[in-house]
Image: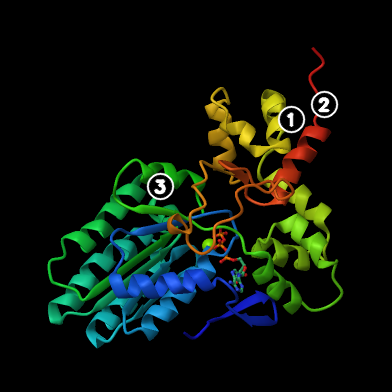
């Protein structure tokens, strides 16, 4: 299967590396169809978008008509063997890019698929990246239900169908998980070997691999950011502290639990851990709560280890990456403990 080209850092193109199991999973899905929309979630920047782009290319190679939607990136593509549908899609995409009514594009896919299947039976893939943010989190579940209907009750028969959705929004997982309408499937940061391949491709002088690994835990986006910040991890930590609003009020309120979670994220799995804090840490994209069993069956690509103290991975709760934990650790150090 052809590997797509991604731009790792400006001016450095590389092929989509590693993720061998995920690529095999694509082949399985292509052969057997996805029984449910597969909704992929995982740490921010772990490589979901890169994987979906690889998926679009691979499925096309396997003879699928592919719709690809990535509104946040203002990217829409219909790689389909039908000139009329393609023209229609491009026209819709053009209008959507103008008026930014993203929901139209997401919904149009239902009609366009029906149109394609009306003409003949075929293999269909719908790949939707971060659509929930575009259409509104409150509509995420309904959208997934629409996708499931397409799989379960198509108006015209298909040969195979693959529906993949990615979300970088920790909270959408909760909204979707309430129903049986999707298979919520986690994906983790890269394996050490895969990450090393990317590290090796970064030009110029750089800190030793082990140091970069300890900071990023194999998160390819953090590798990118570190490079762009000239390896100034402190700067990245500071910016993240501000962006994620780890304010003194927040830190003071949850100090005791945050201190425990920094030592061991599984502390938040304890039955008396405050749900409000857990929800907030998920919303801030700092932790993944309720990690699945590490049976590869439940995961896209290889699951992370059962536990990794150094990387902040617990059995049931994990920091997105070590830097995310470090940001909280710093916020704890910097905020004055309450005087009374
Ligand atoms: N397997 C891979 N091979 C090469 N580069 C990769 C791979 N996975 C991710 N990258 C690169 O790492 C960076 C971050 O990946 P990506 O944008 O796919 O993450 P994401 O999980 O979609 O992030 P977000 O949560 O922000 O949506 C990108 O520059 C991407 O091209
Ligand atoms: Mg993404």
Spatial distance from mark 1 to mark 2, Cα to Cα?
Answer: 8 Å
How many neighbours does mark 1 have within 10 angstroms: few (below 14), some (14-19), or many (20 or more)?
some
Q: Nearer the viewer, residue 115 or 1?
A: 1
Instruction: Verify CB contact (< 8 Å) between mark 1 and mark 3.
Output: no
Instruction: Verify CB contact (< 8 Å) between mark 3 and mark 2.
Output: no
Spatial distance from mark 3 to mark 2, Cα to Cα?
Answer: 36 Å
Label for residue 137?
Answer: 3
Q: Is residue 54 above or below residue 179?
A: below
Q: Residue at x 28, y 75 (%)?
A: 124
Label for residue 25?
Answer: none
Query: Ligand 1 within 8 A of label 1's CB?
Result: no
Instruction: Verify CB contact (< 8 Å) between mark 1 and mark 2.
Output: yes
Position in image of residue 235 (x %, y %): 81, 54
Which residue in the structure is indicated by mark 2?
Answer: 336
Give the mark, 3 or 2, whose residue is nearer the N terminus.
3
Q: Residue at x 71, y 26 (%)?
A: 255
Q: Identify the image quadrant of residue 96.
A: bottom left
Report the number of numbered marks: 3
- Residue farthest to the top, as pictured: 340
What element does badge 3 sit on? helix
What element does badge 1 sit on? helix
Position in image of residue 326 (x %, y %): 76, 45
Which residue in the structure is indicated by mark 1?
Answer: 248
Give the mark, 1 or 3, whose residue is nearer the N terminus.
3
Q: Quadrant of the C terminus?
A: top right
Position in image of residue 185 (x %, y %): 44, 55
């Amino acid at each position: 299967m052809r590997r797509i080209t991604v731009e790792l850092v400006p001016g450095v193109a590389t092929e989509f590396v590693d993720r061998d199991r995920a690529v095999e999973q694509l082949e399985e899905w292509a052969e057997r169809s996805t029984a449910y929309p597969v909704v992929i979630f995982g740490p921010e920047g772990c490589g979901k978008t890169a994987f979906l782009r690889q998926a679009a290319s691979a499925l096309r190679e396997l003879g699928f008509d592919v719709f690809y939607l990535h509104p946040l990136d203002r990217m829409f593509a219909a790689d389909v063997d039908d000139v009329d549908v393609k023209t229609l899609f491009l026209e819709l995409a053009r209008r959507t890019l103008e008026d930014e009514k993203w929901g139209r594009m997401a919904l149009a896919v239902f009609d366009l698929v029906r149109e394609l299947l009306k003409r003949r039976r075929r293999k269909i893939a719908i790949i939707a990246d971060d659509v929930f943010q575009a259409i509104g989190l409150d509509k995420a579940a309904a959208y997934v239900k629409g996708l499931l209907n397409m799989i379960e009750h198509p108006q015209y028969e298909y040969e195979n169908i693959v529906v993949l959705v990615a979300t970088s929004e920790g909270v959408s997982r909760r909204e979707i998980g309430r129903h049986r309408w999707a298979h919520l499937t986690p994906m983790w940061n890269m394996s050490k070997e895969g990450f090393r391949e990317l590290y090796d491709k970064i030009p110029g002088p750089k800190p030793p691999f082990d140091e970069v690994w300890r900071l990023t835990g194999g998160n390819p986006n953090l590798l990118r950011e570190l490079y762009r910040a000239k390896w100034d991890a402190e700067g990245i930590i500071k910016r993240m502290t501000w962006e994620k609003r780890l304010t003194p009020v927040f830190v003071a309120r949850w100090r005791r639990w945050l201190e425990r979670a920094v030592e061991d994220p599984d502390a938040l799995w304890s039955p008396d851990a405050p749900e409000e804090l857990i929800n907030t840490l998920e919303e801030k994209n700092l932790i993944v709560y309720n990690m699945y069993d590490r049976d590869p069956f439940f995961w896209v690509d290889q699951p992370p280890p059962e536990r990794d103290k150094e990387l902040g991975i617990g059995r049931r709760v994990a920091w997105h990456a070590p830097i995310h934990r470090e940001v909280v650790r710093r916020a704890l150090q910097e905020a004055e403990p309450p005087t009374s």
